[in-house]
Image: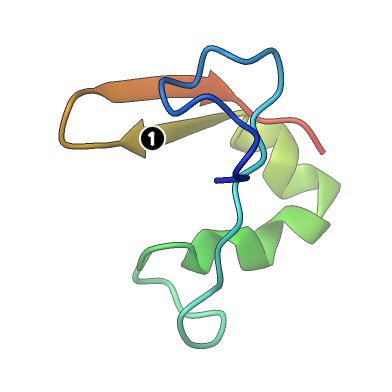
Amino acid sequence: MDMDNKKDFSDRLTWLFGHARGSKVGDHRMFNDVNYYDKQEYMDKHKYVVIETPEKNTIMKQHS
C-alpha cells in the first residue's frame, strides 16, 4: 500500500503495490492474478478484489 494511503482503506483511491510470484500459472498465488489484468475480458469478469488483513476482509471494486 502506498505510504500516503490510510491503512483502513478509507481513502477514495488506494494504491496497492505487489508482485506476481511466478509465471502465469493457474494456482492463484498471492498477486499472481495481476498478470491477467492486461486483458479486458479478464477485467470484465473479475471486477472485485478481496483485501484480507488480520483485522478484516474488504471487498473492493478494481479500477485501472
Percent position (x, y) of residue 35? Answer: 65, 68
Residue displayed at 72% across by 41% down: 43
Is 34 drawn above or below residue 26 in the view shown?
above
Q: Residue 36, percent across and down? A: 67, 61
Residue 32 spot, x, y in % from top left: 49, 68
The spot of residue 39 in percent (x, y) is: 81, 55
| Picture quadrant where residue 20 is located | bottom right
What residue does disc 1 label? 51
Amino acid type, mark 1: Ile
Vertical comparison of 44 with 27: above or below: above
Mark 1: which secondary structure? Answer: strand
- Residue at figure coordinates x 35%, y 68% from the top left: 29
Q: Is residue 15 left or right of residue 28?
A: right
Which residue is more in the foreground, 22 or 51?
A: 51
> Of 38 and 51, which appears nearest the observer?
51
- For the view shown, which residue lies furthest in the bottom direction? 22
Viewer-side residue, 41 vs 36: 36
Image quadrant occupied by the C terminus: top right
Neighbor class of circle 1 (other Cα within 10 Å; few <14, some 14-19, many 20+) is few
| 14 shown above or below 9 | below
Give the quarter of the image for residue 23. bottom right
What is the count of numbered marks? Answer: 1
* Residue at the image position 64 percent from the left and 30 percent from the top: 14
Camera-side residue of 12 and 48: 12
